[in-house]
Image (cartoon, helix red, strand yellow):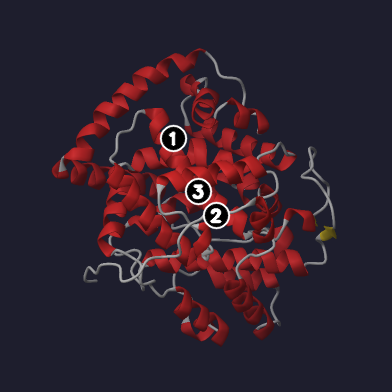
Amino acid sequence: MPNRPPTSSASEFALPTDDELDRWRNIADPPADYAVAAYFAAVDEESPGQLFGHLVRHTQLPPEDRVPAIADFFEAASARPDWVDDQAVERGQAFFNRLVSHQFAALYFASLPSSYAAAKGVQVLHMTGRLRTDTERRLNETAQFMMDISGPGALDTDGVGVQRILHVRLMHAAVRWMIANDPSVKHVPDLDPPRVLLPDLIWSSSWGLPGNQEDLVGTWLTFTAQVYDTFDASGVEYTERDISDHLHMWRLVGHHLGVAPRLVPSSRRDADALHEMVWHRQQAPSASGVAMTEALLDQAHHHMPRPTWPLIPTTFRHFLGDDVADMIEIPPANWTRRVFPVMNRVARFLTRGSAKHPLHARMSAYMGRHLMQGLLDEMRHGDRPDFAIPDHLAE
């Protein structure tokens, strides 16, 4: 599509208060929730699990399967806001691709485990079960999502990235619908995130709505502010414009994900401040967070050669810090911490040129993107991942 400058600015960001964030915990995604409820009501002869799978397993939902509310949702939610700077989005995607291997390292060793330390937000991840019982599949889904939103034209109105974002948004709404309507889920009024795993499916209203706005923007921050902190901790070099463009790209992603505009910062300074505030409010030990982390550690041991295993807990702790790592019971660091100064110098050397020289940047992006896509294809034997619902919520 032709480049265009932004015609108006997004809502001015102001750091929310604790009271405001408390209210945001009881707001999720009304447009997606309405569409999913209408979908289930229109085809109630099938089980919710079948409907869920039918809804989200297609890259493009067949037109004949779109009830009016779903069709209206896709049309409205794919609209491009006026404040978007197309060139900044393209540069933000190029920045992702230039450092794609570092982006995925940040995802695995920082973004995902830090989200498990959000004691209330992690409850819905643990309840749906996928990251605990089928970790590799869910990691592939997340990685493919990142690849899908960062390709050329992916965030155009009809781009594959926008379509994938809207499917994820509907998936979240479907999970909320099932938690609210499944009789096997026990609802209790007040319950701190438990330190031991509970035997039954339980949801407490004191946790807020599943996938509420604070948790949603918290996840958004793990792909932005958390990633930049990880780059700093690993010696990756970048420019201020790189971060500005990457944030602009992710603001557009956040728009399509249904994050409230007033919660989405446009500068790193504001993103860092919001990140610190949200995680100060939400980070706490929980049995669910520990279980999710154990699954992530098991996956690392499965894919990394045995001689590198001592490096695994040290890497998590290097990027997360000991306070967060202790909450999710990452094993202690060891002698391998001595390798990080060397690794940082290597990362600085490799990324310095890509930040300054266009040819180096294009070569890094081309090679890195094709390598990561090849690895993803190999891990899933050439098949794109389907989004699916766990059996205990599908029946």
Q: Nearer the viewer, mark 1 or mark 2?
A: 2
Q: x and y percent of residue 43 in the render?
A: 66, 83
Q: Disc 3 to disc 2, how far (Cα)?
A: 6 Å
Q: Secondary structure at mark 1?
A: helix
Number of marks in the rendered image? 3
| Residue positioned 61% across, 32% down in the render | 324
| Residue positioned 56% across, 72% down in the render | 55
Q: Secondary structure at mark 3?
A: helix
Crowd around label 3: few <14 · some 14–19 · many ≥20 (10 Å): many
Which of the two discs, 1 and 2, labels the residue nearer the N terminus? 2
Crowd around label 1: few <14 · some 14–19 · many ≥20 (10 Å): many
Does residue 223 lie above or below 345 as drawn?
below
- Looking at the image, can residue 147 be seen? no
Amino acid under disc 1: Thr
Q: Label 2 near label 3: C-beta < 8 Å?
A: yes
Residue 328 horizontal side relative to residue 87, left or right: right
Q: Secondary structure at mark 2?
A: helix
Q: x and y percent of residue 323 in the render?
A: 62, 28
Does residue 326 lie above or below 266 as drawn?
above
Q: Which residue is mark 2?
A: 217
Amino acid under disc 2: Val
Residue 264 horizontal side relative to residue 172, left or right: left
Q: Which residue is mark 1?
A: 230
Q: Which mark is residue 221?
A: 3
